[in-house]
Image: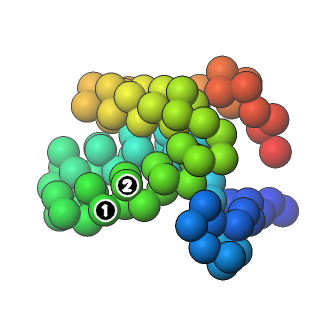
Amino acid sequence: MKHRLGKTYRGPFSELVKTYENSFRYYLMVRNQTILLLERAIPFISYIVRLIYYFIPVFFIEGPKKALNSLIMGLTHGLFKKEGYLDPTFFKISPR
């Protein structure tokens, strides 16, 4: 399998090059982390830190609307343990 995890960007407050995940991958992370939290596989503080850590780059690069949409959908699907395939074009990004 040939793919890259994350994309690089320059942080809004620094000159460091950082890696971020697009809004679709952020949705998947939020959904899966929420399911793991409900199953008590990860601690709550770790859950919150990860949500914020990955939310900030999506917010600044793709905009607040996409970031919040991914967060809300990920939380909703995670709380109801709705797993399965969601078409990446729903987030208006290419699947690659």
For the point 61% across and 73% down, which residue is it?
A: 14
Residue 82 in the image, given as x and y percentages of width and height: 38, 27
Q: Secondary structure at mark 1?
A: helix
In the image: residue 91, left or right of residue 7? left
Q: Secondary structure at mark 2?
A: helix
Disc 1: CA contacts within 10 A as few (<14), some (14-19) or many (>=20)? few
- CA distance separating discs 2 and 1: 5 Å
| Residue under pointer 2 | 52
For the point 66% across and 21% down, which residue is it?
A: 90
| Residue under pointer 1 | 49
In the image: residue 95, left or right of residue 31? right
Q: Nearer the viewer, residue 83 or 76?
A: 76
In the image: residue 79, left or right of residue 19? left
Which residue reaches farthest front?
13
Disc 2: CA contacts within 10 A as few (<14), some (14-19) or many (>=20)? few
For the point 54% across and 44% down, which residue is it?
A: 59
Disc 1 residue type?
Answer: Val
